[in-house]
Structures are given as structure tokens and as C-alpha cells.
Image (cartoon, rainbow, N blue to C red):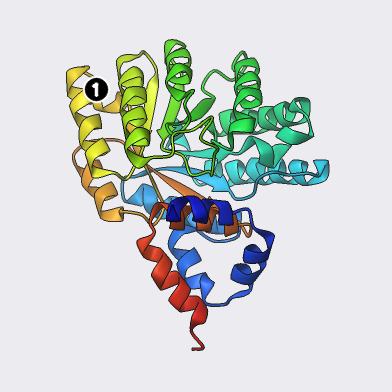
Amino acid sequence: MLRRALRAASASPRLRELIMAAPQTRAIVDSYVAGETAEDAVRVARALRGAGLLVTLDYLGEDTKDPDQAAAVTDEYVQLLGKLGAEGLTHGGAAEVSVKPTAVGLFLGTGIAAGNIARICAAAEQAGTTVTLDAEEHEAIEPTLRIAAELRADHRHLGHVVQACLRRSEADCRALAAGGLRVRLCKGAYSEPESVAFTARREVDLSYVRCLRVLMNGPGYPMVATHDPRLIEVTGSLGVLTARAAGSFEYQMLYGIRPAEQRRLANTGAQVRVYVPYGGDWYAYLVRRLAERPRNLAFFLRSLGSKS
């Protein structure tokens, strides 16, 4: 119930204003967000690559209502990819980018979003790396799948995210895995109606395992996004059972969450990618992270109430 309330709060304008104005919020934000500029993102990517970790970078923001803003977000990604390439961080897809379709105009029209995503894909390919289309609310799933299918004619390595909490996800995994595609599987961090999503934690976990089995048994490249020790163990077991080479799938974790586990997995020879967000529009992202780790909420509320 607390997780659902927090996820709903991520869309509250009043709470957004209160929390973003509180100076004490910054300490928590810095735990999960690389900074506000592309230079901050590159700095963190450089440090993670130095530690033997792969990286995907997300410029924060979503649900863009203005074409100029959608173009500006696209420009930011193009410039970021140029900086990453110039630093030598993108070789073999070591540092890639994650893009929310609504941030580049999905709800302004699929043509606008497709054009902007194509620009980002072209910049990524020039830099020697890849793009993954991020997960969003269920209304965005179908148009995102259509755009991805269209763009893969020219951008074969465009990745896609599937959220295990959605009832449709096992079927989506089957379709995407059959195409030999890059698929990131996560639990899902959006507040969704029961008609389209599982709401009990056990149901979501069972859906995740079903989807994971589909991906690990398919010809594609699974990207297993979880911090759950049980699901990490299941992934390792499936890797053995399906005789997958270490380089044929990867684990993904969020920046600032379980860094010791990230290093431990990498030290075993597994591929581990860290999802690193940056930018000034961090409110919705922060609240969804609190929903995933409610024990942080008490510390956060104490910080907001502190006068120091």
C-alpha cells in the first residue's frame, strides 16, 4: 500500500513543489542522480567504467508536451553521446543511453517521437554504442513498440524495456525474444490499475520469473534489471541451465543502490550495467526510488523536517 501511495505521489504537483524546494532533499538526490549536466553524467560514467561496470545514462524528464522541449531533450542526448564517444567510453556499447519516448514527444505524435529517437540512434551508432527505450505507463507501451519495430529496420540494436508488473509482459517478452532483441526486464515503478497490472508483490515476482525464463531461453540479449537477491540467484541458475555465456546477458542495477553487489557480480565475470540518471527534473524518479525502498522514506521525511 505504501509503495502504491508513493508511486501516485510521483505525479502530484503540490508534493513536487514542496520536495524540490527543500534544501535537505539534495543529499538524497545525490545518492541516486549523477548531477544536472552532461559533464556530471560523463564523470560518473568514467568512474563506473574504471570500476569495470557498464553504464546506461538517462536524461531525466518525461511526458513532454512541447515540441521544442522534445527537440531539446533529443539535442541533449546527441551531445551526451558525442561527449561519451570523445572520452572513449562507448566502445562496444560499454556506455549507452536510455530514452523515455514521452520525453522526446510520444504523446505529441508518434512521428515526432520516432524522428527524435532516430536522431539519437544515429548519434549512438556514430559513437559506437546503443540505445534502449525505457519503460513508462501502460498507455505508452503500444506506441513505443510500434516505433521500435519501425526503427529497427535501420537501427537493429535498439533495445526495449518490459515491466514484469504488467499482465501483458510475458507475451511481449515472447515476441521480442523471438526477434533476437536486446530486452531489459524490470519489475516496474509506475502506479498502474489492477486491470492491466499485478499489484501484489508475489504476483509481480512470479511474472518476473516467467518473463525471465522466456528471455533466457530465447536467442536475444536479456538485460536483467533487479536488485532482488532471489531473482539474481534465479538468473544465475538459468544462465547455467541454458548454457549462456557470460557475455550473452547482463545484470542491471540503479546508480546508488547495492553498489557492493554490483561490484561482487562484476568480479565473478558477469556483465553488470549501472543505470545512471542525470538532469534537473529528478522529482518523479526520486519518489519512485523511495517506493522501491520504503526504508529510505523515514530518513527522507526526517530530512525535510530538519531545521539544520
Tell me residue 86's x, y (percent).
Answer: 55, 44
Residue 36 in the image: x percent, y percent? 59, 60
In the image, residue 207 sits, relative to residue 47, either above or below, namely: above
Residue 232: which quarter of the image? top left
Q: Quadrant of residue 259?
A: bottom left
Rendered location of residue 47, percent (x, y):
39, 55
Question: At label 1, which amino acid type do we have?
Answer: Ala
Reply above or below: 280 against 183: below
Task: Say which of 166 and 263 sits in front.
Answer: 166
Q: Which residue is mark 1?
A: 245
Q: Number of labelled discs?
A: 1
Point out the residue furthest to the top here.
Answer: 178
Q: Position of residue 151 (x, y in %)?
A: 64, 19
As drawn, is 67 to the left or to the right of 169? right
User: Could you tell me which residue is drawn at 65 percent across and 22 percent down?
Assistant: 147
Disc 1 packing (10 Å; few <14; some 14–19; many ≥20): few
- The vertical placement of 103 against 23, above or below, is above
Question: Relative to residue 272, is residue 255 drawn left or right?
Answer: right
Please indicate whether residue 84 sits to the left or right of residue 257 in the image: right
**Foreground: 83 or 37?**
37
Q: Is residue 236 above or below residue 216?
A: below
Label 1: element kind:
loop
